[in-house]
Amino acid sequence: MAASTSAQPPSSAPMPAHPAFPSLIPSHLRSAPTSNISPPTTPAAVLKLITSSTTPHAVHNQLIPTLKFVAAGGKGGDKDKEKLIKKGEENMALFDQNLGDVTADDIRNLAAGLVFVVSARMHPNHTDQKTYNADLLRLATEICINGDADQLNACGARLGELAWGILRLARYLKTPAAALEPIQALSYRAVDRNSLSGVHAAFLEASLLTGNFSGVQRLIYNEYFEVKQMSPSYLDVITFYHHAGLICAACKHWEKAVEMFSMGVSVPTAAASAIQLACAKRAILCGLMNNGKLVTFPKYTAGVVTRVVEKNAKEYVKLAEAFIKEEWVTVRSAVATKEFKDDCNFGLLEQIISSIPIRRILKIKSRYSRMTITDLANRIELPGTEGENEVAALVYHMIENGDMRATIDSSAGPTIVAFMQEDKDYTSPSALEELKAENRLANFLEMELTRSGRELGVNREYLKKQAHSLENNGGKGMGGQGMKGGEELDEVLSGRSQGGFGGGKKMGMRGVGSNMGDTGF
């Protein structure tokens, strides 16, 4: 798959009398107009399109849009859409071509085309056993690591498909760790830092499968403000936040785990997902580990999600309420509840039960200034020499982890624990740096909110939805008056109407997981 090169002028060609006048379009960006290119309908046509698109302009304005068009099923009707999508993927897979002779230059210069070809070969419904092998994984790895980053980034949602394809192939070859390097390279090289992508969700799943969390912190602790550029699917988004929560829980970063799970729960949708329900259940358990309180999900959480959680997470809410009320017998009896094992949350439940002595010590600390280890052990129901040793070790551990400030003195008589007030020094260099970082983030968030508000204020689609919503709610708003008969939406949006916002037919929505079957993990 060698890229075509332009012909050189003969040596006998006359030299121009003066340098050529500058062109409006640099020569390296010139290419045929997109409108002159017919969507390829055969593998040969796909190959020709890829190898002939050798300039940045051709790649961005001709190759990628055309291949996306083919992958989406072309202009066919909804009735034949699945067949056309399948045919398009098969054409793009180039099963009749040997990709073993792809050179390093091809990988750099034809990166975008190769993304579509390789991801098509990895498609779960169109794989060819002859090409679905370790050689395909090696080629995909080379594309992710050495392909032109600008071309890769322009592929948008197709990068997510490539990442998930790499993970599936690595698991098929029983080498899931082999997926980490290429997917991590995609997430760092080809995806803008502010953009959420399906690549991120695939990388977190690969990290969970291998237990390797060394490269995920940057993704989890990043703030994402762009969800259109890389076109992640609804399933990609909730999978990312679910997996991020799992990784934070595995690292015992309970506060961040609650935040990630809550983000997954509150993703806008019209049909609750099984992943969102899993996020809600795990958020409740991590909330108990974090501060011993029942998690409150954001007010903007979709009503359908709230209802599903209320119906299907009763045992989790019951556990949280018993934990808050210090009904420790009820909390410990939860180990007999089958639901926690079925949901693969038994490990978190065991950690909650193990944390009961810590919660009891923290509560005693708020009431007393000092106490003997023997008395402390009796109060948290761990009497005897063995219990005293366990409590002493637990207090040492809490002091070392910064869970509380206290001293232990055993020099004269019985061992005494002296509890100290928590007084954080906000004048220390570390505290000042932390405050500066939080202040920078707050300022950035304020700027983003202001910019987003301005964009919404002039976004016609948003205004139409507001108009439709107001009309379906009785047509009241903007002064309490409804739409007058015969008024057009254009007149309302342009400010010529005397009434409130109104509009046409209410738009329906559909979401992934309406049958609660998209577990995806």
Image (cartoon, rainbow, N blue to C red):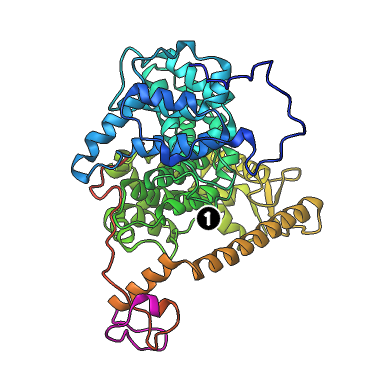
> Which residue occupies 62% across, 19% down?
8
Q: Is residue 179 left or right of residue 17?
A: left
Q: Visible in this render: residue 464?
A: yes
Residue ID at (43%, 44%): 232
**Residue 383 location (% of width, % of height):** 51, 45
Q: Where 103 falls versus 59 (above or below)?
A: above
- The kind of secondary structure the magenta stretch mainly shows is loop
> Which residue shows up at 56% across the image and 25% down it?
109
**Magenta segment: does it hold 365?**
no
Relative to 215, say whether 314 is above or below. Answer: below
Callout 1: 10 Å neighbours few (<14), some, many (20+)? few
Residue 267: quadrant of the picture: bottom left
Q: Left or right: where does residue 27 sit relative to residue 116?
A: right
Q: Which residues are magenta?
A: 473-491
Q: Is residue 256 shown above or below 150?
A: below
Q: Secondary structure at mark 1?
A: helix
Report whether residue 166 is seen: no
Q: Choose between 252 and 248: the one closer to the eye.
A: 248
Q: Nearer the viewer, residue 278 or 267?
A: 267
Give the x, y percent position of residue 354: 47, 43
Identify the image quadrant of the C terminus.
top left
Q: What residue is shown with label 1?
A: 291
Name the amino acid type tagged 1: Asn
Tell me if residue 474 is in the magenta stretch: yes
Q: Nearer the viewer, residue 295 or 174?
A: 174
